Image: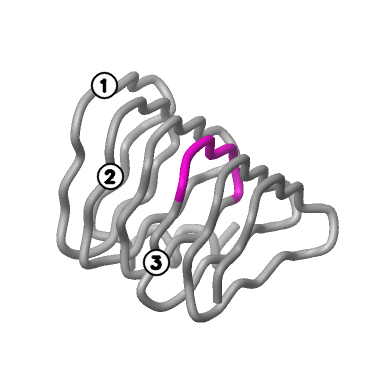
């Protein structure tokens, strides 16, 4: 539990699991999404989708870690990581794609 709390302290913004958001989300640093979101995400930073996060959006980002669910296309400048419990349905364009054992990915990748 201690490392989990330390990890969250490094994140600039956390969107709680009771939040449902629709629209365009823009941010510059790091954001952890625990809730639901539908729309467009644009960022020069890092997005972490928590296990409770459910996102339906096209994402233009620096890097993204998916531990929850994402439906949409990703254009990541640095890295896309799909965690053990992560689920991605959509196409990915990135120089680095990391898919952990147990992850689910349905789509195409361009590296």
Where is mark 3, residue-wise?
Answer: 76
Q: Is residue 77 above or below residue 5?
A: below
Residues in magenta, as a range: 67-73
Q: Residue at horizontal 31%, vertical 56%?
A: 60
Say what secondary structure mark 3 lies in.
strand
Of the residues under marks 2 and 3, which one precedes in the sequence? 2
x, y (%) of residue 7? 45, 65
Say how the picture is coloured: one colour
Q: Is residue 22 above or below residue 96?
A: above
Viewport quadrant of the N terminus: bottom right
Judge from the rendering whether residue 56 lies leftward or rightward of residue 105; answer left or right: left
Q: Residue at horizontal 35%, vertical 74%?
A: 77
Give neighbour class at mark 2: few <14, some 14-19, many 20+ (Cα, 10 Å): many
Where is mark 1, residue-wise?
Answer: 22
Where residue 55 sits, quadrant-wise, is top left
Of the residues under marks 2 and 1, which one precedes in the sequence? 1
Where residue 101 sits, quadrant-wise, is bottom right
* 72 within the magenta span: yes
Q: Is residue 20 above or below residue 88?
A: above
Where is mark 2, residue-wise?
Answer: 41
x, y (%) of residue 104? 76, 47
């Amino acid at each position: 539990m201690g490392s989990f709390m330390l990890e969250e302290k490094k994140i600039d913004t956390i969107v709680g699991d009771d939040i449902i958001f629709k629209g365009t989300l823009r941010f510059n640093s790091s954001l952890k999404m625990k809730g639901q979101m539908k729309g467009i995400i644009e960022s020069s930073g890092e997005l972490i989708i928590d296990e409770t996060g459910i996102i339906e959006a096209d994402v233009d980002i620096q890097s993204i870690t998916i531990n929850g669910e994402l439906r949409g296309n990703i254009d990541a400048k640095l890295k896309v990581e799909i965690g053990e419990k992560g689920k991605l349905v959509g196409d990915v364009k990135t120089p680095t794609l990391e898919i952990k054992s147990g992850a689910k990915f349905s789509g195409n990748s361009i590296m």
